[in-house]
Image (spheres, rainbow, N blue to C red):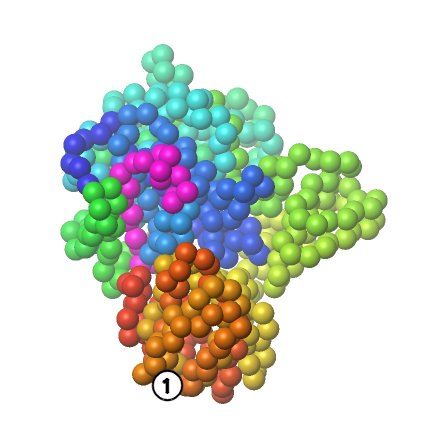
Amino acid sequence: MQTKSPNLVPVILCGGAGVRLWPVSRQQHPKPFMTLPDGLNLLQKTYMRAAQLPEQVALLTVTNRDYYFKVQDSYAAFTPILPVNKCFMLEPTAKNTAPAILLASLYVQRYFGDDAILLILPADHVIADQAALEKDVSVAMQLAAQDYLVTFGIKPTYPETGFGYLKAGDPIGKTQAYRVQQFMEKPDKTRAMEYVAQPDYFWNAGMFCFKSRTVLDAYKKLSPDLFKQGAAIFDAMTQASDDDRIETLNFTPAQFEAFESISFDYAIMEKADNVAVCPAHFDWNDIGSWLAMSELLEAGKDGNRSTGTVVMHDVKNTFVHSESRLVSLLGVENLVVVDTPDALLISQRDRVQDVRQIVQQLNDQQHPASSIHRTVHRPWGSYTVLEETSEFKMKRIEVHAGQSLSLQMHKHRSEHWVVVQGVANVVNGEDTLQLKADQSTYIPAGNKHRLSNLQQETLILVEVQTGRYLGEDDIVRFEDRYGRETHLAKTHEA
């Protein structure tokens, strides 16, 4: 990475689980990776906005290391069009926004200087008006250069109870910005209606802009213990460069586990006295609920919106999202229906914010639907569980061109592989095989094995597992080209 101090370093935060968008958003496939009606996911939209901003030469992404390959895949389609220097800061575990922004600020200060300006962009917003965004960012940069901690305020259009609010105070010069007088937590409906009725209240967008020195001084003053933790963790990080345009930063898991989990608003913004709000002139949609997702679609007859194959009769003000099968509704109104291959959500429109209660129950029951989909994406491709009983499990496996699974072994299960498409290069014990469509191999428990696709065509095969235990954590990994550690075997890895 180059060390010249840029005017602007966008920092994309790609972490939160997005539980209010369950059952599509889950722990291992969170909402930044959700595909929107236009075919792009939220992370891709955020990357496009950041990469097109003027006066920036580097882009930093803070994400969980389990999402690293998902992030790379999301960016890959745009890299030839929007080439920027990219750095990936990989967290061993999620610790909220204050630790993430602290580490990002330490990195920017070290490599780009005290006066380098960070623009913090959560990867769960939809903003279509790039020109208006760039104008507002320019105003925020001017304020940041004057040592303000800048947030962006969205003028409320309805009494939302799922957002935090802020109250604007005195204007700052001729910038069309204001000092922040007060932050308010997510209100109840009555208080939200009061906020919406007053012209000096804004939704807190969770987007920030400041100089590295300014925000680090704020950490030292307002959250000194957190700063000390972050500085020690940052100093112990390891760095790797794939080439002169991509850099990855990793942190010691044991140190990171001790990091205090706290939001940036709580740790810094609500305590600081140099906070400014830049009223947003760009369109903004925080995709934080299924109602917000539905607003991306144009309402049809009787206020209904839908994606997928949906048939409705005598239905009003209802949103339906179907991923794989026909969904039909008759004689209902004011519903949200979200259907995935392994989970179905039905809610009253005014209760969608409570989806987190369903996810909590699933977590308490240790139900896999809280964290994984039937289709699970991996660095090498994906697998889909087609059927599962106590006696066998059947999967459809896709391996991308040029990719390979780890050299591994299972103690309790045997596997049967049947190639459906492409050519499979297989290590099975002492044997090395090349299997074409309609050919198969049997891998007994205890055999070291590896599946690779050396061709340009996607490899597809069907795997049937048998044995006394079929859990995903029955895996011993000997070699892995993606650098995944043994402890990841307990998180449904393959």
Identify the residue shown where x is 35% and y is 53%: 68
Q: Position of residue 361 (x, y in %)?
A: 56, 64
Residue 225 seen in the figure: no
Q: Is residue 79 above or below residue 352?
A: above
State the residue in front, 413 or 260. 413
Q: In the picture provided, is 179 more to the left or to the right than 382? A: left
Q: Residue 274 lies in what quarter of the image? A: top left
Q: Position of residue 477 (x, y in %)?
A: 32, 74
Residue at x 47% of width, y 49% of height = 33
Instruction: Measuring from the top left, give residue 425's x and y in whole percent.
Output: 38, 70
Q: Residue at x 47, y 22 (%)?
A: 281
How many callouts does the rendering have? 1
Report the amino acid beneath label 1. Answer: Gly
Q: Which residue is mark 1?
A: 446
For this orientation, the residue located farthest to the top is 174
Front position in the image: 23 or 327: 327
Region in magenta: 75-96
Q: Quadrant of the N terminus?
A: top left
Callout 1: SS: loop
Q: Relative to 27, is 215 on the left or the right?
A: left
**Quadrant of the rendered structure where residue 190 is?**
top right
Frontmost residue, 356 versus 34: 34
Nearer to me, 164 or 339: 339
Q: Does the segment drawn in magenta span residue 79?
A: yes
Relative vertical location of residue 220 with respect to residue 450 in this rendering, above or below: above
